[in-house]
């Protein structure tokens, strides 16, 4: 089941299991059940007797297995053969069940243990989804540390009948006590904030009490991380405010064009960035979103960043590196059927459309790569490109044209996404040259038409161009003194990881140059804080 390299790695990890426990399997006569049982026996064989296997489980979902510690009821179940992107989730669950302490901030772990109420989570995921592991691992940990929580992790590809019955068309999707509760990527901190009503107030209070920074970076992607690293290495107090470390890198699979790195994946690069930030003792404030920038009231004064909870962070200089997000089609039906057939991540949601007909809108590299990936899963892919020809690299276009179950439509303007009130049923489009309108019958639409910068919150304060990109000069200065910007949210062309990282480093150096030429602000100066805080 596991190759020699994985077995060696797993044996090393399982040496950290301190307390014995059982893997209790509930099986049927399917091939997946045989595969699962082999995996469980492999795990037990590598654990030096600390993990044992039983096959008398009574779980209604079959095949599945539960982690059973002593006489206490099992609270974590995998209705999946958790390999692929979920193999790490499995390994962590084994370690935590065996008494190995999780690498989680003590305050967050205590919050998880003390979460009140009864919670029964069902997490739908796919093994190819790189956005799913964060949610799976967070809710697995919650089940293992809190006796009032039960979590079942379900592979949507393995339980297609459930996916159909419950209308699961995007992952990760979380049901809580039988009701849809959360969709999309999230960290333990973010999920606890949704569950714990008092978490927001505590977080706002903690942020408001922070001492001012010399440099505060807003954004955790390659540009933001590089800026924070370069600033921290100057020996100055550096903070980084971000919703998630890695930004859009987390949504990227193969990265093969970063100098000195032959090949890596987005989540791995994001984890490496986080480790490097931790090494240089950057004050990382994750799970938070900025909502306003308050310019300094006088030359050399404090600049404020107000977060959504109302707290205001102060800094002598600020680097804006908020990146970009997927651009919407903005056609009728898109919002109505989001996560009900309209998707933006082919790697995450592709397996849910196995054997179905889908469209990909967008003929750049992202769109063509998505169509190629989906062609190996779905019945048929139709790619629609607005321009007269595809804009992707020639090698990708050649590969796409070689696939027998792909249709390419150019000069195709998407007009509307059609549905029956529950899910997508088709797409209406117009040929731009002839003006003729056509309808495609299909079950899924994957939107891949580029990015839009995350800069709306700066409206009226920081100068932006008509595309919403922050206008900067060659040294990353904005029109606001002491405020710099870098990466995909700026006017710098070529939205690439390596370009963003270089721009982040340049912005940090420019910020440092600003600091050494600007008097320090008066410590007593305070920024305006909303009356609700």
Image: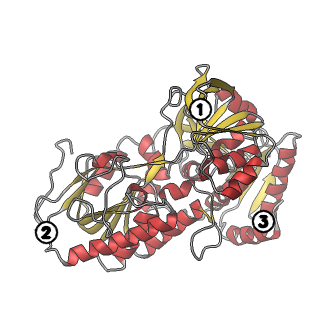
Q: Quick one: label 1, few (<14), some, or many (20+) residues within 10 Å? A: few
Q: CA distance from mark 3 to mark 1?
A: 70 Å
| Residue 58 occupies quadrant | top right
Residue under the image location 76 percent in, 72 percent down = 8
Q: Nearer the viewer, residue 50 or 8?
A: 8
Q: CA distance from mark 2 to mark 1?
A: 61 Å
- In the image, 142: left or right of 440? left
User: In the rendered image, which residue does mark 2 sit on?
Assistant: 521
**Disc 1, SS:** loop
Q: Nearer the viewer, residue 397 or 265?
A: 397
Q: Position of residue 73 (x, y in %)?
A: 65, 44
Quarter of the image with the N terminus in it? bottom right
Q: Say which label, 2 or 1, has the lower sequence index.
A: 1
**Disc 3, SS:** loop
Are the residues flagged by discs 3 and 2 in contact, CB closer than 8 Å? no
Q: Nearer the viewer, residue 452 or 88?
A: 452
User: In the rendered image, which residue does mark 1 sit on?
Assistant: 433
Residue under the image location 47 percent in, 73 percent down = 276
User: In the rendered image, which residue does mark 3 sit on?
Assistant: 49
């Amino acid at each position: 089941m596991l190759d020699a390299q994985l077995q060696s790695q797993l044996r090393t990890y399982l040496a950290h299991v301190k307390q014995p426990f059982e893997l209790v399997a509930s099986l049927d006569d399917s091939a997946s059940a045989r595969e699962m049982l082999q995996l469980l026996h492999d795990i037990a064989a590598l654990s030096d007797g600390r993990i044992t296997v039983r096959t008398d489980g009574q779980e209604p979902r079959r095949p599945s297995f539960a982690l059973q510690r002593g006489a206490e009821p099992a609270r974590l179940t995998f209705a999946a053969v958790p390999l692929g992107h979920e193999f790490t989730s499995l390994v962590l669950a084994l370690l935590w069940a065996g008494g190995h302490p999780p690498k989680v901030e003590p305050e967050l772990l205590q919050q998880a243990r003390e979460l009140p109420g009864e919670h029964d989570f069902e997490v739908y995921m796919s093994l190819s989804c790189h956005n799913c592991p964060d949610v799976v691992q967070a809710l697995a940990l919650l089940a293992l540390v809190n006796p009032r929580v039960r979590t079942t992790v379900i592979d949507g590809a393995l339980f297609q009948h459930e996916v159909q019955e419950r209308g699961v068309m995007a992952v990760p999707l979380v049901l809580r006590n039988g009701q849809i509760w959360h969709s999309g990527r999230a960290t333990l901190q973010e999920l606890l904030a949704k569950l714990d009503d008092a978490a927001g107030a505590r977080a706002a209070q903690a942020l408001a009490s922070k001492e001012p920074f010399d440099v505060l970076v807003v954004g955790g992607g390659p540009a933001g991380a590089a800026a924070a690293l370069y600033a921290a290495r100057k020996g100055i107090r550096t903070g980084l405010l971000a919703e998630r470390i890695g930004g859009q890198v987390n949504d990227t699979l193969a990265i093969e064009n970063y100098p000195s790195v032959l090949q890596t994946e987005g989540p791995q690069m994001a984890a490496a960035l986080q480790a490097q930030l931790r090494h240089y003792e950057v004050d990382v404030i994750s799970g938070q979103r900025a909502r306003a920038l308050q310019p300094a009231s006088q030359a050399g004064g404090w600049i404020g960043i107000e977060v959504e909870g109302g707290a205001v962070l102060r800094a002598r200089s600020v680097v804006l590196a908020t990146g970009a997000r997927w651009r919407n089609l903005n056609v009728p039906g898109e919002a109505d059927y989001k996560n009900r057939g309209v998707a933006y991540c082919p790697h995450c949601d592709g397996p849910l459309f196995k054997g179905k007909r889908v469209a990909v809108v967008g003929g750049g590299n992202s769109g063509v790569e998505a169509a190629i990936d989906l062609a190996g899963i779905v019945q048929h892919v139709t790619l629609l490109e607005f321009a007269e020809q595809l804009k992707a690299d020639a090698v990708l276009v050649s590969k796409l044209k070689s696939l027998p179950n792909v249709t390419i439509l150019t000069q195709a303007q998407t007009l509307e996404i059609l549905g029956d009130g529950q899910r997508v049923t088709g797409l209406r489009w117009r040929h731009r040259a002839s003006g003729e309108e056509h309808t495609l019958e299909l079950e899924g639409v994957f939107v891949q038409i580029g990015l839009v910068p995350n800069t709306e919150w700066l409206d009226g304060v920081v100068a932006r161009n008509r595309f919403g990109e922050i206008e900067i000069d060659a040294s990353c200065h904005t029109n606001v003194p002491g405020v710099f910007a870098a990466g995909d949210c700026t006017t710098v062309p070529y939205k690439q990881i390596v370009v963003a990282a270089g721009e982040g480093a340049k912005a940090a150096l420019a910020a440092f140059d600003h600091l050494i030429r600007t008097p320090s602000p008066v410590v007593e100066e305070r920024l305006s804080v909303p009356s609700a805080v």
